[in-house]
Image (cartoon, coloured by chain):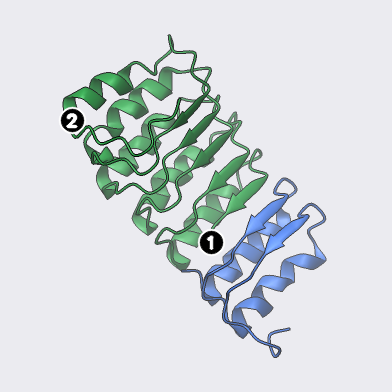
Amino acid sequence: MIQSDGCHFLANYLSANKTLQELSLGGNKINNEGIIQFSRFLEFNKTLVFLDISRNEFNDQGF
Amino acid sequence: MDFSECIDDNRNNFQTFFHKFDANCNVRFLTLDNMTPDLSNCIEALGIALGKNKIIEVLNMRSNRIKIVQYGQFWKLLCKNKSLKKINIQKTECNDNVMAALGEYLEQPDLNLVDLDLSRNSISDVGTKTLCESLARNKSIKILNIE
């Protein structure tokens, strides 16, 4: 299961990536800290068009 | 070609069968979901054959129990294959220890793999780090499932 540290690595990867279009991360253990880490990539990535982060552990505070 | 839920438990039969998927085989879609035989015993033969194959595009191996050592060896053998476009290894007990070998496959510069489904496995943050480092060198993956 992917947690906060995994989100950090994914964000770094996605920030520089120009190939990936669809990513499914549903059903992992991404909490508020993780989703904050993960969302850093949004500023840099213009390629991803589908993202599934359903069934994780973050809540309103993470947003 | 779909061999899902096959119940033939004879290891030798599958080793012989998998060897036929080499350069002389024209099969483009191969599905081996939920097999009763332990694929660990014959997956090396599949890796050797697919390493020589230039036609196959889709490989599905969902819901199989594959032991770590044999699984790692499979990915190393698969590095020679450049034709696969879609691989589904959902629920195959792929874990952090297998990710290094999988990563080696994903780093191949001339890979054509577009769609990779790793869902319902045992990949933690450690395996995610390995995966991301390999994907950073990959130029082909467009669809990735790590549910």
Location of mark 2 (residue): B11
Marks 1 and 2 close (CB-CB < 8 Å):
no
Q: Position of residue A42 (x, y in %)?
A: 78, 66
- Chain with green colouring: B
Rendered image: mark on residue B33: none
Chain of the residue under label 2: B
- In the image, residue B114 sits, relative to residue B118, either above or below, namely above
**Would residue B137 be found to the left or right of residue B79 on screen?**
right
Q: Position of residue B60 (x, y in %)?
A: 46, 38
Precedes in sequence: disc 1 or disc 2: 2
- In the image, residue B35 sits, relative to residue B26, either above or below, namely below
Q: Position of residue B71 (x, y in %)?
A: 32, 43
Question: Quick one: label 1, few (<14), some, or many (20+) residues within 10 Å?
Answer: many
Q: Nearer the viewer, residue B106 or A50?
A: A50
Q: Is residue A62 visible?
A: yes
Q: Nearer the viewer, residue B139 or A32?
A: A32
In the rendered image, the residue lying farthest to the top is: B24
Secondary structure category for the residue under label 1: loop
* Residue at 26% over, 48% down: B67
Q: Quadrant of residue B73?
A: top left
**Would residue B134 be found to the left or right of residue A15 on screen?**
left
| Identity, as a three-letter code, of the amino acid under mark 2 | Arg
Location of mark 1 (residue): B147
- Chain with blue colouring: A
* Residue at 44% over, 66% down: B124
Q: CA distance from mark 1 to mark 2?
A: 31 Å
Question: Quick one: label 2, few (<14), some, or many (20+) residues within 10 Å?
Answer: some
Secondary structure category for the residue under label 2: helix
Q: Position of residue B89 (x, y in %)?
A: 45, 46
